[in-house]
Amino acid sequence: MRKPLLLIFFSLFTLPIFAQEKGIDQRIDEAFQPISEFFSKRVFFQIGDYPFVIYLLVGSAIFFTVYFVFPNIRYFLTSVNVVRGKYDEIEKDGDDSKDGEVSHFQALTTAVSGTVGNGNIAGVALAIALGGPGATFWMIICGLMGMSLKFVECTLGVYYRDVDENGVVYGGPMYYLSKGLKEKGFKNLGKITAVLFAIFCIGGSFGGGNAAQANQASIVLKDLLGMESTFSGAIIGLLLAVIVGIIIIGGIKRIASVTEKIVPFMALLYIIACIYILAVNFSFLDDAFALIIQEAFNPTAIGVGGFIGVLMIGFKRAAFSNEAGVGSASIAHSAVKTKYAASEGLVALLEPFIDTVVICTLTALVIITFNSTGIFSYGGEGGIMIDGVIYEGAGITSKAFAEYIPFSDIFLTLAVVLFAVSTMISWSYYGLQSWKYLFGRSYKSDLTYKLLFLSFVIIGSAASMNSIWAFSDAMIFAMVFPNMIGLYILFPVVKNQLNKYLNAIKK
């Protein structure tokens, strides 16, 4: 493991040397690939034909949805009203009303910016390439059930957060695992799971929250600009690292101020573009929905393991996109200004709906209707051949947009880059909170993490898509294991906090 790591960092600071036989992109990819394979094999251990972590997420989402009696439906309008500020006066009433650093809306946009990213553009395309249209159905189901998981983990994040003497908030699974499990008599288990989560979250911030995003941004930028030199990926990575670095220096308040502007703007613009394309292809929409349902339950033409295979692909990509059950979003939500933990849990409930049920579904429908005349075939190794050219990830979505929107290459490139940047800055906060939990809250600790994080922007931009996504999946899903231990032990606390908040807003 040491040799690949040394090669990566050696490559980062010796860019000019590698202009000969092998480019910097290829060298970084070769160094990164064994690390990716190492973690991927260990996280995605299988029970039968499929990874255990997928069963864990599906089963947990069903359990919490049933236990809280479908909170994703019952409290949806309440959640919207909380974000609108309808209950702000109630939440501010009390001695602890000053706790927190950001508003409900800012906390939501920060967390959404960590999920609404290239998983919605590239990840959806990858799901359809691997599992066909049927994967879309299971992505939607996963998004709906994931709303319950987000509600539970984000309520706990606020309830067990730390607030220092300067009003700075520290929260997330690290704290509800250590403090909550100790409270329940599992002190040692709490310490171990908190440390494991922090380690995995740091890895997730380097991988899925950073390298994978930079990777897709690099792909679309190189395509738009016609960059084919060996330095292209690394150069783009350096530019992205500078942009991200300027933003993350300011901490959660600056991150929130940026995401509350970028996320609504880009999400709305992207949704409008998708709706326009679907309106143009309105006559094919009924066929698209029929195909999604048919292939979800009878995917005979796809060689991915039949019905269960398509289900697993859909759940895997949706879970990667909305991160329900991962615990990462609770770190952002912990910084909210409120005295009622469940209020922010209800706000968090909206994330998977926005991310997966709305944006991922629109992307999928655009791609499926694009193929209404049989332009390409579904199923494969993550790529789709269109007009004799193999496209991957965001490239597939870009091709679909280009068919209907003038200058769509510029628009989608902008969307991918802005989504990537917003995701990276949110995940930098998640990773930094975990880093500080392990190594202390000093300036030196802060700076060390941020430099490491920015180096992975370059790595992600230069490495291949396959190795990046494998590592990203592994790190994101590794966080599920310690997080779920906390959720299953502490969910009665969530029940009490929910009843407390509902009683308060009914008065």
Image (cartoon, rainbow, N blue to C red):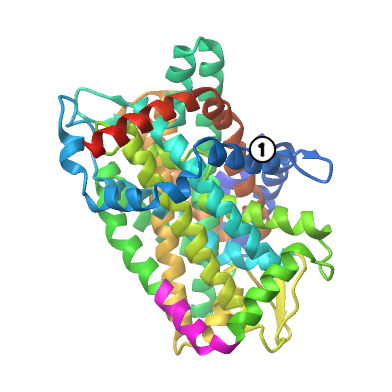
Point out the stretch of residues depicted in magenta.
271-283
| Residue 142 visible to the viewer | yes
Q: Position of residue 305 (x, y in %)?
A: 83, 57
Magenta highlight on residue 199? no
- Which amino acid does the dot numbered 1 rest on? Leu
**Identity of the residue drawn at 39% across and 66% down:** 267
Compared to 24, does 128 lie above or below? below
Q: Position of residue 241 (x, y in %)?
A: 41, 55
* Image quarter of residue 54: top right
Q: Position of residue 207 (x, y in %)?
A: 55, 47
Compared to 297, does 113 lie above or below? above
> Of 446 and 228, which appears nearest the observer?
446
> Of 171 and 271, which appears nearest the observer?
271
Query: In which quadrant of the rendered image does the C terminus lie?
Result: top left
* Image quarter of residue 21: bottom right
**Identity of the residue drawn at 79% across and 40% down:** 46
Q: Position of residue 502 (x, y in %)?
A: 31, 36
**Within-10-Å neighbours for mark 1: few <14, some 14–19, many 20+:** some
| 273 left or right, relative to 159 | right
**Which SS does the magenta portion mostly show?**
helix
> Which residue is label 1 attached to?
56
Magenta highlight on residue 274? yes
- Helix, strand or loop under label 1: helix
Compared to 490, does 55 lie above or below? below
| 73 left or right, relative to 54 | left
Q: Residue furthest front?
A: 507
| Residue 238 visible to the viewer | no
**Identity of the residue drawn at 45% across and 83% down:** 276
Compared to 373, does 233 lie above or below? above
**Identity of the residue drawn at 48% across and 53% down:** 352
